[in-house]
Image: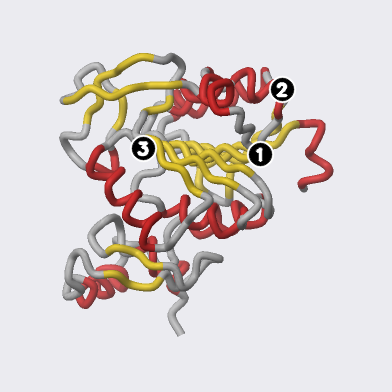
Amino acid sequence: MVDLFSVKVDAPFGKLLRIPLRMIPRGSTVPILFTRARGKRWIVGSGPHSCWLGFNEVRKRNLFTKMVLPGNIVFDIGANVGSYTILSSILVGPRGKVLAFEPMPENIKYLQDHITLNQLSNVQAFEIAVSDYCGTAKFDATTDRVLGSISANGNFTVQTTTIDQMVQDHGVIPNCLKIDVEGGEAAVLRGARQVLKNHRPIVFVATHSPEVHKECIEILDSELYSAKIIGNEKDELMAIPINDQKQKS
């Protein structure tokens, strides 16, 4: 039997697998097949098929599932169309809460549709970019809406906020930060220093470049976090407060 979790999308079997997937109409819904979100619905065309088939970031999702507990509060920063938002909603349960942040209009529509479709009453979505300051920024989505990011050469303007400001404004303290903002991850951490210092959430961060990776490690080190690479994915980190490391290992 072929292990789908080990299949790379660009491998021959991965290319073969995509042929029947192209026949599924865009906008139709399919069940998520794996992870704790199994059985929830996914809108075809909103994102990669791997998100509902179950071989997207498998090691990261398995670790995320282990670390996020019932009753937790998760900040999904760079929520895109809601793959981790759906999973987080299931993991935290009715006593928990998920705040999902996504600045791109097309993505936020899919995100909100996924929230409604799956009746995720513990999720609140924010159409805003998270960075290290509050205001506005140029956002570049000219190549791929999945890869959009804050950029001086951006083609439209988005509102920005910081994690510290969101906690101050809403009084919601995260137990977990999931950060994936296509290269702006260090800025997100800079804007979360008070939360990191005072509230000690677990951090999952995708770093996207050696420079961003190095800066993220430096910020986390300075706030007394221990960061480790997830599996063999050199740009995926999980960071735990040093004083909690024994409890969480």
Relative height, residue 87 to residue 15 (above, below): above
Q: Amino acid at mark 3?
A: Glu
Task: Please state if 239 lies on the left or on the right of 166 as rendered.
Answer: right
Q: Quadrant of residue 104?
A: top left
Q: Three-letter amino acid code at disc 2? A: Asn
Q: Where is mark 3, residue-wise? A: 102
Mark closer to the chain start, 3 or 1: 3
Give the image location of residue 185, x and y in percent: 46, 28
Tell me the crowding category of disc 1: few under 14, some 14 to 19, or many 20 or more residues within 10 angstroms, Cα based: some
- Who's the residue at 27% across and 21% down the image? 151
Residue 198: image tag: 2
Separation of residues labelled 1 and 2 (CA atoms): 12 Å
The percent position of residue 228, horizontal first and vertical second, equals: 64, 39
Residues at marks 3 and 1, CA–CA distance in whole angstroms: 19 Å
Tell me where residue 72 appears, x and y as whole percent: 66, 46
Please tell me whether residue 91 is drawn above or below residue 149 in the rendered image.
below
Q: Which residue is mark 1?
A: 175
SS category of the residue bearing label 2: helix
